Structure formats: structure tokens, C-alpha cells
Image (tube, helix red, strand yellow):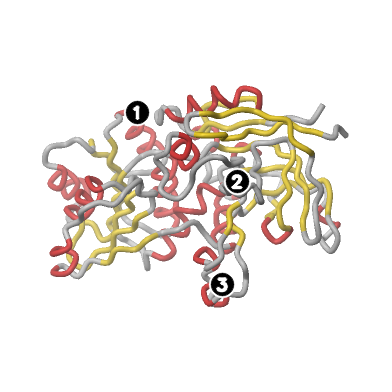
């Protein structure tokens, strides 16, 4: 095995590069994975240009990944060696009030593999990555790498649907038909939603949403957006998944909701915004932040993949080598190409 590997580095704003890095050794309670695929998240493309409110360069990206466990550190389960697995990249402390309450996604000391400017938790856009054993989740052979690399992304809408409350028969709107929006359609349907309407300004994205299970799609630029959504739903929405997270989308969401409806903020807002507070008060609307996922949500996402409900071939549009990371990030930043992934390949 070579002493070094190739790894993607977001070095500074507008600069993605590939560097030689030492092949990491797993410490106590850790495993090393040979990475098969790593996805480029919207968080990555936003961070590169300075539009992410919580993440910025320099950092070693790659929090959406699948690979094979090939070495266990001291105290880690050696029987995992050889297993294909996905990674839950949010690393919780296990001790705080939220962790003890089963809300590890809201850990007071939460850290992120692949979203860590300190460099302590490098990501998986590399040939190898070291992660805590408790953060790996084996996937069965029937789940392809292309589907498996999407599990982490799917887990976010799965979590949102779970904390939304009972969606059985609900009228649901999904604002934004990027990857998270498409997966919100899948998660809401899995949770029992009755009618799902998606909005997006891009016709091709609306068509893709219809192909993945939405009942109707509305142009986000429709002048009378509220009327169009209500007509498609057969009335006001019970729940809205806002997968855009900007002031305009929140206003559209509020217009679509019934009184006492629920607004789920699933997309990462790039900045503060003015929202119609009088309606939140008078209509007794519930606004619910949705932040990442718990182990339960990762396992639910894997179950959807096992059932064939994660259409990776329809979502993943391009695969790049690690050496072509600059081109991969540029393609992902277009926002129209579906999910772009990197295949690091073995070390020389």
C-alpha cells in the first residue's frame, strides 16, 4: 500500500484542488474504509463560493459516501472488515441532553466528517477515510454503490418526514426539486402522504419529480402560485417541505399552508430573511427546523434502498475521478445535472 493517497481539498473560496495526503490509520474505535463513491452535496457547492452560513474553506469534503471497510483499529469490531458500508457523517458526543433523549442529530457538541474546517475529521473525497465504527452502517449486496451513496442524502428528508408528525393521507407540498426535494417526495410517500405537489422553476426538474412519484408539479414562477398549488392539491397543504430555504420560498410555503399547518425547513438557508410573523401567530402555524438525521433515519433510508425505492440511476447524472474534482464541482454547481459523484479509485 502506498504511503499517500489523493484527496480533494476545498482550499479557499472558489478553489478546489487535489492533494497528496497520508493514508490514515484507524485509531481506537475507528475503521478505515476504501471509498467507492463520494457525493458532492449542495452544502459543498455553496461552501466553495461562500454561500453556506456554517461551513467555509479550508476543509476536506466528502460526507456522502459508500465504501468497503478494510481495517479496524483497536477496540473496533474486526468482523466488519470486508463489509460494504455507508457512513453517518454527523458525529455526536453521546452524552449531552439531546443525545440522551435520542436526538443525536441535535447534539450540543456535534461534529461533521467532511465538513470540518479544523481538519480533524477529513471527508471521503479520497481513496481512504477513517471514521468511528459506530458511524458505519453495512449495506446488503443488493444495494448498488450508486444507490448506497445516496443513503445519507435520503436520510435528511426521512428525518424531516418523521418529525413532521403523522403524514397518513396528508396534502404535502415540496418546494424545490433538487436532490433533497426529490428525496422528500420519496420520504413523504413512504410516510403515507396522500397527495404530493412539487414546485420548481426548471421544467426538467419538475418532470423528474413527477417520474419519482409526485402527483403534480407547479412552476415556482407561477404568478398565482398559491392558487395553482391549492388546485393541484385539492385544497391547502397540511405540510410543506421547503427544500430551498430562502425568504421567497418561505412566503410561498406559508401561502400554500392551511391554518395550523406545518412548515419544515429542510434546505439550508443561506442568510436571514423576513417572514410573515403575523400569519405564523394568527394561523398557529408550526415552523420546524430539520437538521440532518439520527441512526434511526439512516437505517430507514437503507431500508428504502433495499426495497428498491432509491432510484440511483435516475438521480446520479455523472461520475468523475478524484483527479477531475474541479470539473465535478463545476458540474454540481450548475444545479441542473442531478447528483454528481466522485469515484476515488484505489491508491497507486
Q: Earlier in the sequence, mark 1 or mark 2?
A: 2
* Rendered image quadrant of residue 146: top right
Q: Nearer the viewer, residue 131 or 22?
A: 22
108 up-or-down from 338: above or below: below
Q: Nearer the viewer, residue 110 or 213?
A: 110
* Rendered image quadrant of residue 49: top left
Q: Between tags 1 and 2, which lies in front?
A: 2
Task: Locate the N terminus and report the quarter of the image it occupies.
Answer: top right
Mark 3 to mark 1: distance in Å? 41 Å
Mark 1 to mark 2: distance in Å? 30 Å
Residue 128: % across, % down: 74, 40
Discs 3, 2 touching: Cβ within 8 Å: no
Task: Locate the C terminus and report the quarter of the image it occupies.
Answer: top right
Q: Earlier in the sequence, mark 3 or mark 1?
A: 3
Q: Residue at x 19, y 35 (%)?
A: 221
Residue 63: % across, % down: 59, 46
Residue 262: % across, % down: 28, 63
What secondary structure is marked by label 1?
helix
Q: Which mark is residue 294?
A: none
Mark 3 to mark 2: distance in Å? 21 Å
Disc 2: CA contacts within 10 A as few (<14), some (14-19) or many (>=20): many
63 up-or-down from 315: above or below: below
Q: Which mark is residue 114?
A: 2
170 up-or-down from 1: above or below: below
Q: Residue at x 56, y 43 (%)?
A: 150
194 up-or-down from 328: above or below: below
Q: Earlier in the sequence, mark 3 or mark 2?
A: 3
Relative horizontal placement of residue 269, taking residue 153 as reference (left or right): left
Q: Residue at x 83, y 56 (%)?
A: 73
Q: Which mark is residue 204?
A: 1
Q: Between tags 3 and 2, which lies in front?
A: 2
Q: Which mark is residue 99?
A: 3
Amino acid at each position: 500500500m502506498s504511503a499517500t493517497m489523493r484527496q480533494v481539498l476545498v482550499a479557499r473560496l472558489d478553489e478546489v484542488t487535489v492533494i497528496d495526503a497520508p493514508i490514515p490509520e484507524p485509531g481506537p474505535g475507528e475503521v478505515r474504509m476504501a471509498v467507492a463513491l463520494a457525493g458532492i452535496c449542495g452544502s459543498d457547492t455553496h461552501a466553495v463560493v461562500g454561500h453556506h452560513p456554517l461551513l467555509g474553506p479550508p476543509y476536506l469534503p466528502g460526507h456522502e459516501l459508500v465504501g468497503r471497510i478494510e481495517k479496524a483499529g483497536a477496540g473496533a469490531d474486526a468482523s466488519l472488515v470486508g463489509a460494504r458500508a455507508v457512513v453517518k457523517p454527523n458525529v455526536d458526543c453521546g452524552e449531552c441532553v439531546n443525545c440522551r433523549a435520542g436526538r443525536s442529530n441535535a447534539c450540543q457538541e456535534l461534529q461533521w466528517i467532511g465538513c470540518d474546517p479544523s481538519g480533524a475529521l477529513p471527508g471521503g473525497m479520497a481513496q481512504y477515510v477513517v471514521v468511528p465504527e459506530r458511524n458505519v452502517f453495512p449495506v446488503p449486496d443488493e444495494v448498488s454503490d450508486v444507490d448506497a451513496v445516496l443513503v445519507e442524502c435520503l436520510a435528511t428528508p426521512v428525518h424531516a418526514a418523521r418529525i413532521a408528525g403523522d403524514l397518513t393521507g396528508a396534502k404535502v407540498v415540496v418546494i424545490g426539486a433538487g436532490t433533497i426535494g426529490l428525496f422528500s417526495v420519496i420520504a413523504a410517500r413512504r410516510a403515507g402522504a396522500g397527495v404530493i405537489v412539487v414546485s420548481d422553476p426548471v421544467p426538467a426538474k419538475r418532470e423528474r419529480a413527477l417520474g419519482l412519484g409526485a402527483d403534480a408539479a407547479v412552476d415556482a414562477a407561477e404568478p398565482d402560485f398559491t392558487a395553482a398549488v391549492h388546485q393541484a392539491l385539492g385544497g391547502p397543504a397540511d405540510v410543506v417541505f421547503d427544500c430551498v430555504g430562502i425568504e421567497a420560498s418561505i412566503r410561498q410555503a406559508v401561502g400554500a399552508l392551511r391554518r395550523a399547518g406545518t412548515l419544515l425547513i429542510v434546505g439550508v438557508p443561506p442568510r436571514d430573511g423576513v417572514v410573515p410573523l403575523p400569519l405564523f401567530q394568527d394561523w398557529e402555524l408550526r415552523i420546524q427546523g430539520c437538521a440532518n438525521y439520527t441512526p434511526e433515519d439512516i437505517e430507514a433510508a437503507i431500508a428504502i434502498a433495499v426495497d428498491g425505492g432509491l432510484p440511483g440511476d435516475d438521480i446520479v447524472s455523472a461520475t468523475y475521478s478524484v483527479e477531475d474534482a474541479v470539473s465535478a464541482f463545476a458540474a454540481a454547481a450548475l444545479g441542473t445535472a442531478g447528483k454528481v459523484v466522485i469515484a476515488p479509485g484505489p491508491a497507486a
